[in-house]
Image: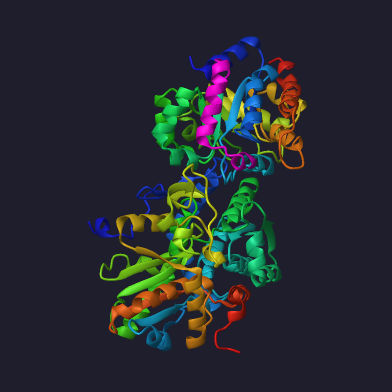
Amino acid sequence: METLNTLRAGPDEHGHFGIFGGRYVAETLMPLILSVERAYAQAKADPAFAAELASYLEHYVGRPSPLYFARRLTEAFGGAKIYLKREDLNHTGAHKVNNCMGQVLLARRMGKSRIIAETGAGQHGVATATVCALFGLKCVIYMGATDIERQAPNVYRMKLLGAEVKPVTAGAGTLKDAMNDALRDWVANVEDTYYMIGTVAGPHPYPAMVRDFQTVIGDEARRQIIEAEGRLPDSLLACIGGGSNAMGLFHPFLDDRGVRIIGVEAAGYGLTTGRHAASLKGGRPGVLHGNRTYLLQTDDGQINEAHSISAGLDYPGIGPEHAWLHEIGRVEYVSATDDQALEAFQLTTRLEGIIPALESSHAIAYAKTVAKDLGEDHVMVISLSGRGDKDVATVARALGDKAVGGLS
Amino acid sequence: MSRIAARFAALKAEGRAGLVTFITAGDPDAGTSQAILDGLPAAGADLIELGMPFSDPMADGPAIQAASLRALAAGAGLTATLDMVRRFRAKDEATPIILMGYYNPIYAHGVETFCREAAAAGVDGLIVVDLPPEEAEELAAPARRVGIDFIFLTAPTTDDGRLPTVLEHASGFVYYVSITGVTGTASASREAIAQAVARLRRHTGLPLAVGFGLKTATQIAEVAGLADAAVVGSAIVQRLASGLDPTGRAPAGLAADVLGFVKELSAGVRETRK
């Protein structure tokens, strides 16, 4: 009976979370998707796989990542105690590597010699290129031309790591277009290629598998907050593009009904402008990239371009499990604008000496708007999903003359 | 008997394979696209696949991606696509039309509404690339109820173990994607197609259409000697694209040029006896 009362049992055997998820791919890919599903089920049941992954996470990625009490942010916000889960301290500088390490071990078990991936901000691309270098696998990264321009340091890192970075000029040249081209590559290279999806989206089993590899974030945070505070947190916050860092933090707490869980989407220029990346707030259910989920789309079912200052959130969809958690009301989904994220970026840098990714800055920005009203005994854990060094040029451009307030 | 079944029966009686031609609805503009569609039967098309434009055609190569974007830029969409079929059907009662595309525009339109409107417009079949059998019934079942065939794709990766799953609900014909890749790129060898056709025949009595990578009358003739129909898409769309003026608009005579090209291709099926 216990499974009936848990929110952690999904998806069903066909990969559905309620009406969301599924396997909406061309027939050419179906046999591959099914083989990934079988291989992952076997790996999941094999203690040797878990042990191998745990060893790499400890010795190569540098886990566990700290749960850090941000004293000065807490003082500045004037309310809830703010803890930051420091995924920025992982090797490669973001949570993405947790998933890549799991998937590369799976790809090796499947005997695949070539890895492809899509990337937005480049964090997943860098993490993918890194694990490919580690295991000597050929690596091809699809990245939108717009993103290549705004994330130049990550592009160079990928190349240094031996990856081939293929620019995608279709559409707006962002993450959605990169994912289209990665799928096209996979269809054409079914024999030797493994598609390493970077978020909790795509056809089943990816949303569940990527979530499983990312729940290390929440599992650790749970132990760490109990150690620090002697109890569970009152709230969790994380930014959401596809939603993998958020799902990783949230999932181990879904059944703790006393824990308020908040996902922060990118509101870009503002939800009313139509130029944002908030799929849940501004979209409706549809089918794209292998799954049914909330999508930004026209009345006629054409997919809209998303907008966010943060390349990693600039995607018109969201992982299907988030869509389901939204519909059942277990997780609250809110949003923060480009400007709010920029402000939080500077604040965290100045007050804590931590340069957060623009993605993570959205979560911190929302925390700022609610922390004050929550009271000093409220314990909040925010996922600091990645470091912001990659964003320095974007921030400098956005701030222009206002650059780094007060520093003249 | 459905138009698709009737057409394949007539082809069998003629002792030849059929030519299936693909164009994207509304490419490069509504008028030109309608003129091409209306002229296809006379140019030698035995069945017509009409592409429903989509912003993210991830199983298509550059030619059909560009066609989709041209059509969308010119204001095409699902309702306009059904209007095209209705106008075609007023002039041609016999040539089957199969709508081909991706699921989201149909889902956004509403599955039941779409099926009803498509049947009323004169649509005979659906090919929805991102609905494999595992997900297809939510559209295939309502489509069947209004007499529209749901045509399943099979691929080189669809092995004997999986074929029964794919073919279980198949009707109309079976489409064999002859390469592992997107549309309009590589071409399969004659031997590979021959083996695949023989394998599929062991699993189904439905007519077999072979597509992806067919660009010339010679290739079409090869397939026509093996399968029940040959499908040409990207080559036709490419011909259209190459005839656009520098601003991307259709000059006078573009429809005639595309239809002339289709006529050349159709020699591939008409001169090959089975």
- Residue B148 can be seen, yes or no: no
Residue A41 position in % (x across, y down): 44, 55
> Residue A150 sits in which quadrant?
bottom right
Q: How is the image coloured?
A: rainbow
Residue A205 position in % (x across, y down): 46, 53
Quadrant where the N terminus of chain A is found in the figure: bottom left
Instruction: Write the start and end of the magenta stretch as one range.
Output: B70-95
- Residue B199 can be seen, yes or no: yes
Which residue is more in the foreground, A276 or A74?
A: A276
> Residue A237 sits in which quadrant?
bottom left
Residue B94 within the segment the image draws in magenta: yes
Residue at 76% x, 29% y: name it. B216
Which residue is more in the foreground, A350 or A193?
A: A350
A86 to the left or right of B153? left
Residue at 32% x, 65% y: name it. A254
Q: Residue furthest top?
A: B13
Residue B168 position in % (x across, y down): 45, 30
Establish if B190 lies above or below B58.
above
The main secondary structure of the magenta stretch is helix
